[in-house]
Image (cartoon, helix red, strand yellow):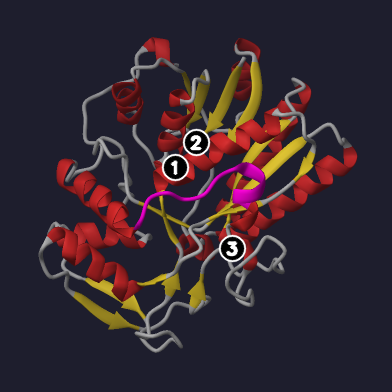
Amino acid sequence: MAILITGGCGFIGAHTSVEMLNAGYDIVLFDNFSNSQPEVLRRIYEVTNENLQFYQLDMRDKERLEKVFMENRIDAVIHLAGLKAVGESIHLPLKYYDNNINGTVTLIEMMKKHNVKKLVFSSSATVYGLKAQVPISESSPLEATNPYGRSKLMVEEILRDLYISDNEWSIIPLRYFNPVGAHQSGRLGEYPNGTPNNLAPYITQVAAGKLREMSIFGNNYPTPDGTGIRDYLHVTDLALGHVKAIEKVMSGVTGVNAYNLGTGKGYSVLEMIQAFEQIIGKHIPYSIVDRRPGDVAICYADPTKAKAELGWEAQKGLEEMCMDAWRWQVNNPNGYESSFELERSWV
C-alpha cells in the first residue's frame, strides 16, 4: 500500500514527501512541474535515501491519472496540487477555478472509482476571510475574499457534500497559515517563478542582491509597528502535520474534520525583516507602498485543536525559520537549477 501525494514536487510537497518517507511510508508522487522542477526528485532521494514512484501529469488528465491508480495500490491521498498565488488568482480567476476545483473533482472521482476514501486536503487560512477574530479557530466564520481562497473554500464544501453522500470517507482539510524556511540540509526550499509572492523568499532574494528592495504593502495598520501581522511556521513543521493527518485518516475515523496548522504567534512584516537582518548580518532595503486590497491587519492561528486531536504542534521558532530560509538561498542562488532530466523509470 502507498500514499499518493499530488503536487509532490512543490515547496510543501517536497518537504511532505521527505517526512512521509522518514516516517516509513511508501509514497507515489505526481506533479505537472508548473511551479516546480524535476531536480526536486533527486534531492528528495538525496536527503532520505528512499525510493519513490513518480508520474508527470496534470490531475485534470483522467486517462493518465487513472494509470496511477491502476499501477499502484493507493491507500490514501495527500492532495497538495493547485495554483496558489492570490494576486494572480484575481486576474485569472477561471484558471484557478478550473485547476483547483475541476482538478480536485477529477481526482476525487478517480479515488471513488478505485475505492480510495482517505484524503488529506491542502486548504488555507484564506478561507477565513477578513472578519475572523484572532486567534482564529476552526469554528470561525468562513468567507474567502479572492478566487484562490474561494477555490479552497469551494473544495472544502465539495468534500463535506461528498461525505454526506457517502459516510465511508475520512477527510482532513488542513488550513495552512504562512509556511517559511527550508529543509535543514539546504537542499530543498522555496524558489518561486518571478517576483516572490511570499514574504520569506522576497526577503532572502533582496538580501542576496537578486532584487533591489522589498515593497511593504502598508504601514498604517492597527498593529504595533503599522505593518501586517501573520502566523509564520516552519515548512518542516507543516510537513509533519501531514504525517499526523495521515495517521488520523488511516485510523478508521470517518467524517470531514478541518485543522489549523500554525504556531499561534504573530510576527509583523518589519519584525520578520529585522529577524532576517540579525541572521544575515546586513541591512535589507525596503520601501512602503499602498496596501493591497483584501489584506487584513492581523492573522494568526489557534492551533489548540491540532494539538489535542492530531498530536501536532509547531516545534521550530522564528530564528530557525530564518536561518534555514537563508541557508537555502545561499546554497541555491538560482533555485533548482540543474540539468537533471526525468528518466524513464520516473514516468
Q: Is residue 14 left or right of residue 186?
A: right
Residue drawn where x is 62% and y is 14% of the image: 1
The correct choice, above or below, for 14 with respect to 72 in the image is below
Q: Which mark is first along the chain, 2 or 3?
A: 2
Kindly check if marks 1 and 2 are in contact, taking CB atoms under 8 A apart as contact: yes
Q: Is residue 251 left or right of residue 320?
A: right
Mark 2: give few (<14), some (14-19) or many (20+) Cα within 10 Å. Answer: many
Amino acid beneath label 1: Ile
Decide if residue 50 is in sight here.
yes
Residue drawn where x is 46% and y is 66% of the image: 265
Judge by depth and name the residue closer to the eye, 290 or 219: 219
The correct choice, above or below, for 209 with respect to 9 in the image is below
Amino acid beneath label 3: Asp
Q: CA distance from mark 1 to mark 2?
A: 9 Å
Q: Which mark is first along the chain, 2 or 1?
A: 2
Judge by depth and name the residue closer to the eye, 97 or 279: 279
Judge by depth and name the residue closer to the eye, 104 or 286: 286
Magenta stretch containing residue 308, yes or no?
yes
SS state under label 3: loop
Q: Position of residue 107 (x, y in %)?
A: 67, 33
Decide if residue 295 is in sight here.
no
SS state under label 2: loop
Q: Which residues are magenta?
A: 306-317
Mark 3: give few (<14), some (14-19) or many (20+) Cα within 10 Å. Answer: some
Residue named by callout 3: 302
Residue named by callout 2: 7
